[in-house]
Amino acid sequence: MPLIAEHFGPTFIAPDGSLKRRKMRATIFSDEHAKLRLEAILHPLIRLECEAAARAASGQYLMFVVPLLIESSSWQDRVDRILVVDCSPATQIKRVMQRNGLTREQVQAIIARQANRATRLAHADDTASSFSTHEYQALSLTLLYEYPFNERIRTLLRFEDLFDRFTFFLSREDAKEHHIALMTLFEIADVAGRADLKSDLSKELERQRQTLISYRDNPGIDQTTLETVLVEITQTLAQLNQMHAKSPKSSPPKVATSKCYLAAPAN
């Protein structure tokens, strides 16, 4: 704050010693030299604070939250991967208006001076969607997969389609539709009998089980929920291991379903 007062003058400082953000925002977005002056003051201090926090941090991942990561090219050389939290332009504008009390025109002017959405996504190693509620509802039936699909993804997508078909026709009242449900069940049993699928699912479940075990005694994790998930995975693994590659002809087909969980901290 003393440096800001020295370079911009006392009119930018509120009576309580804080920055007059609206006044500074209006200044730097109308004067490029003022913007560069402010960045020259703030960015080195922010970087020092980030480095100090990084040295003190512990855990499997070290994450820096950098709003202008693409614009500040030096950051890209200091990280192993870039995660872009993405949303639609309409959501972006709405959120900034609500958060900062700005007009739509002001927000659009700010966005126009930053890297656009396509540029940010082009730099991303990974993306996370942050849509609004109505956008989530619109996308609730849409799943995105990286193309080309590998054999495992194709098989799991087929499983998903078969189970959806089975559930739909089973809930109907017509006998012919029940017949379709029964035939779908046989098809599910046939796909589930593949030895390579059993092996893939077992490996994936075991990998996720080991990952989740590492969260035991973590104060940020609901331990009751964690143990419930671990029990479900363990039981599913046991069921998979008891399955035969193909069901014997003398007995009805047996179907085992499994749940896969993302290892993410939860309150």
Image (spheres, rainbow, N blue to C red):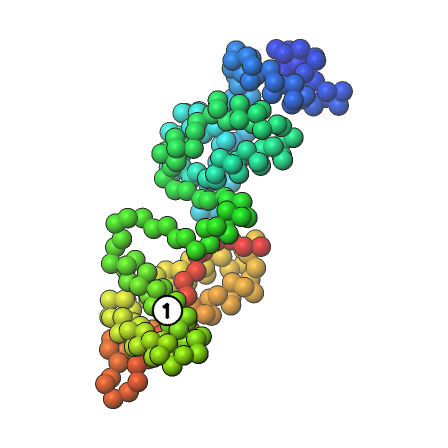
Residue 40 horizontal/vertical position (percent): 52, 16
Residue nearest the observer in this picture, 33 or 233: 33
Evaluate whether residue 242 shows in this view.
no
Instruction: Please report the residue visible at 44 percent of the width from the left and 75 percent of the height from the top.
Output: 171
Observer-nearest of 85 and 216: 85
Amino acid carrying mark 1 in the image: Arg
In the picture of the structure, the residue carrying the numbered disc 1 is 165
Query: Considering the numbered disc 1 on the image, is that residue within a helix, a strand or a loop?
Result: helix
Which residue is rendered at x = 51% and y = 63% of the image? Answer: 226
Decide which of 72, 45 is in the foreground and name it: 72
Marks counted in the figure total: 1
Q: Position of residue 258 (x, y in %)?
A: 39, 68
Say if 104 sits above or below 247 in the image. Answer: above
> Quadrant of the rendered structure where residue 75 is?
top left
In the displayed structure, 189 sits above or below 261; it is below
Report x, y in % for residue 196. 24, 66
The location of residue 158, given as percent across then percent down, is: 30, 63
Q: Quadrant of the C terminus?
A: bottom right
